[in-house]
Image (tube, helix red, strand yellow):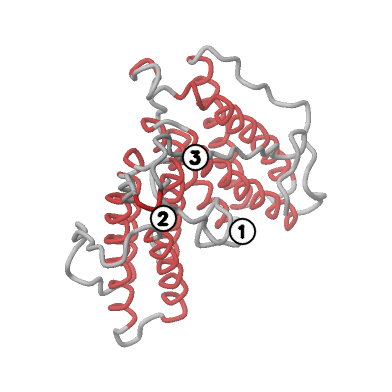
Amino acid sequence: MQPPSRRTFLALGLITLTTACTGTDGTDAATKAPAPDPDAPVRLRAVAATDTLLSAYDALLGTPGARTALLQPLRAETAQHRAALAQGIPAGSGTPTPGAPTTAPSTSAALATLERQTAQSHLADLDAARPPLARLLASIAAANALHATTLGAPPDQPDPATTPIPSPSATAPSATSPGTALPALQQALSAEHAAVYGYGVVGAHLPDDQQRADARTYYAAHQAQRDAWQRLLTTLGTTPTPAAGGYQLPFPVTDAPTATKLAAHLETRLTTVYADLVADLPTPHRRTAATALRDCTLRAQHWGAPTTPFLGLPDPAPTVTPS
């Protein structure tokens, strides 16, 4: 499905970051040694953590009575994560030992804990990665969180809508201020405006049961996230983009099944917005966007949206290579 236009439901406009490397000294590039990849240490740590997770899946799959139908698809996605993270690492490079437990998990609950630990290790490296790799790490961390809930763990807390956004006044104005990412921030705000509108439609077509209660909770979460982006943009001296008078729905919503389908569509589209925002924001603010990506992922699953190994990214994941 192509993303809707600016006046349609989510008004998605993707920002592509490109880099170019050119020589200026006339030296034949073939005689030059390749420049070291600044992302190599981050990728090595991410691969090592993922290797530990893969070993844990293999150990649990080898136990009597293992829930093979549950574990094998998650293990397959983890292997895809490993392959994407390893792109650009020279053959034969060693990987550092990750800080994960050496004792293999013996239960799904223990494996869920390890999934969350792996997600945290990826998020801890967001500030050290260049934008494309940061985007990939955030996507995989969201997948780790989704794996954890699939294995039976409760959803991560706190909700990202209540997570404080770092104040730009506490950071240097150039390299660390999100001022250069204003278009992406405005896009995230526009997407949250649309989500608030959409959840109003969703709630109106759900029966007065747990589904409607969940819709109210998620409606409030998107209101809070919308307000947070508005405050940040105002602090940066920029007028926040106002909500449109109305939004064109991607399909008619007439009953509970189409309402839940709309909710899943809302959250899935937002994963794309927040994955791109991770790449567009400077380092002190990436974690906020990555956390929003995670929670949109979990809400999308709640509403029955199909999942992919690389949430918010095209499938397959783009190659991450040095410039």
> Quadrant location of residue 100?
bottom left
Q: Residues within 10 Å of mark 2 (few under 14, many from 20)?
A: many
Q: Is residue 140 above or below residue 217?
A: below
Q: Give the x, y percent position of residue 313.
A: 55, 52
Dot 1: element: loop
Quick one: 176 or 155, which is closer to the camera? 176
Q: Give the x, y percent position of residue 184.
A: 56, 31
Residue drawn at the location 27% of the way across and 50% of the way down: 41
Residue holding disc 3: 20
Q: Residues within 10 Å of mark 1 (few under 14, many from 20)?
A: many
Report the amino acid beneath label 3. Ala
Report the amino acid beneath label 1. Ala
Q: Residues within 10 Å of mark 3 (few under 14, many from 20)?
A: few
Quick one: 168 or 63, which is closer to the camera? 168
Q: Is residue 9 above or below residue 68?
A: above
Q: Earlier in the sequence, mark 3 or mark 2?
A: 3
Q: CA distance from mark 1 to mark 3?
A: 37 Å
Q: Earlier in the sequence, mark 1 or mark 3?
A: 3
Would you say 168 lies left or right of 222 here? Answer: left
Mark 1, mark 3: which one is toward the viewer? 3
Residue holding disc 1: 305
Residue holding disc 2: 145
Would you say 116 lies left or right of 294 here? Answer: left
- The quadrant of the rendering that contains the N terminus is bottom right
Q: Earlier in the sequence, mark 1 or mark 2?
A: 2
Dot 3: element: loop
Q: Give the x, y percent position of residue 235.
A: 48, 14
